[in-house]
Image: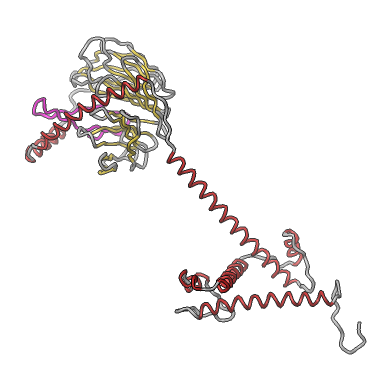
Amino acid sequence: MSNSGKKERIHFGTLEKEAVAHAKRKREEEEEHDAMSTTVVDNLLDVSEGAVSARPGAHIDLDQIDEVMGDDEELMLTDDALATRRRAMAEFDRKRIARTIAIPTNDAHVKDALRQNEQPICLFGEDAGDRRDRLRYILSKIAIERRDAGSEQQEIEDEDMKSDDEDEVQEVFYTEGSEALLQARQNIAKESLARAELRIERQREDCKVDLASVRRLRQNLVAQLTNYTIVGSQVGDDRPLSRIAFAPNSRQVLAGSWSGAIKLWDIPGCKMARLFRGHTDRVGGLSFNPRAGQSKGCVDFASGASDNEIFLWSLEKDTPVGNLKGHQSRVVHVDHHPSGDYLGSASYDGSWRLWDIATEQELLLQEGHSREVFALRFQCDGSLVATAGLDGIGRIWDLRSGRSIAELEGHAKEIFGLDWSPNGYQLATGSADNTVRIFDLRKIASVQQIPAHKSMVTDVRFFHYDSTQSSEPRISEDMDTSGDGNED
């Protein structure tokens, strides 16, 4: 200590003059750097039109700075000026983050925080306020590093996810088919072309009918529907009825129940003609063969149930004449191909299958729905089949190639029923969202929504008019009685 009148300040720690000078230079450099950053931003704001005012100590909105200096102006800057601008923007970003960081006021807690971040708890000439500022600076730098690292990681994850999605979309796989499937597809293609030709010819003839006749036909149909009354009623079973199917001649009707029993009733007397026993659980699907009753000993109808079984029946026997095995879960729907040689089935195992009735052989096991498949119908030509299920999506499949050619989207909930229009290109679907939708294959889109029900729609059927019969229109029904009703 000097003996002169002026006393020197005593520092606890080292008293080296070089250390004192180093600490002063460090603080002066930081102050100079802050002043330079403020000056650069002020200059950038002043040279731009409509610049905001940057008063000392005023808050500067970084969004305004970005608007002032656009991309075109940024390209005109030199490399040094651009680097200076970016450093200034980064510093303002850091300070903005620093203002949001809560710093403890207790000096002991500040030192603990510095120690946790592997920083010295005390620098030469540093008081408690300086330590708090240093801790705020360190935490703001760490926050920026974590933010940048997180953004890069998120970009990498997004890119990987996008790549995975593209791979999934582009992934196409094939399974080897049997010789029987190839032969079936050739037969279906040949027969469907003949049916399509007849359908188109019939549609051309219908186009020649004048509008007045069409209007009169519709009025007569509406009049008949409004005058419908109950002709007869009968108790179908001890348990609820789950499926009803009319015979092609409209003189008999099949009724399946939750008990597994299937009963044949005469119309209109409602007298039971035969009881068919075979299923041990709820009957889910019933379908008459288009050639039912034409020859003795043939397969007249098919049924599917919750016992995972599909039985083939003759109207002359009360026991099954055939059994199609393969489904691993409940069979909820079956439908005959228009040729009468093949049968389609939909199941809760997430697949639909195509069967050869004559050989009782499984020709095709097709997946594609993300949840249980509930409905299946063949198009009138026989070339296409539509499926739908609890995923709320309908799919159109080409039986000649095995490809899924269209997706029917629009329903908000599960699809329980569907049917093809006689014109061959329109499709109706009924859903748990209480609506019926009409899809057009020419547009692959929903063209009409019918919000006619207050509860779920369990099945839908189109009106079929047979011009070869009498002048009175005829309705061909196949309804599911487990829900709200049908839509014709």
Q: Position of residue 375 (x, y in %)?
A: 33, 30
Q: Is residue 32 left or right of residue 44?
A: right
Screen quadrant of the N terminus? bottom right
Residue 266 versus residue 123 in the image, above or below: above
Q: Which residues are magenta?
A: 460-488
- Nearest to the observer: residue 446 or residue 150: 150
Residue at the image position 7 percent from the left and 39 percent from the top: 210
Q: Is residue 241 visible?
A: no
Q: Residue drawn at (56%, 78%), measured in percent from left and top?
A: 58
Q: Looking at the picture, how far across and down is residue 87, in whole percent? A: 60, 70
Horizontal side of residue 159 vs 189, given as left or right: right
Note whether 130 is above or below 225 in the view shown.
Answer: below
Q: Is residue 350 visible?
A: yes
Residue at the farthest bottom position: 5
Q: Main secondary structure of the magenta part?
A: loop
Image quarter (top left, top right, bottom left or bottom right) of the C terminus: top left
> Does the magenta run of residues contain 479?
yes
Left or right of 354 on screen, residue 290: left
Instruction: Where is residue 74? Give x, y as percent.
Output: 50, 71
The answer to which quarter of the image holds residue 98 is: bottom right
In x, y percent, where is residue 342? 30, 21
Count every numbered label the image shows and give the total: 0
Q: How is the image coloured?
A: secondary structure
Q: Above or below — where is 177 with respect to 449? A: above
Q: Is residue 127 inside the magenta stretch?
A: no
Give above or below for 6 relative to 392: below
> Residue 226 lies in what quarter of the image?
top left
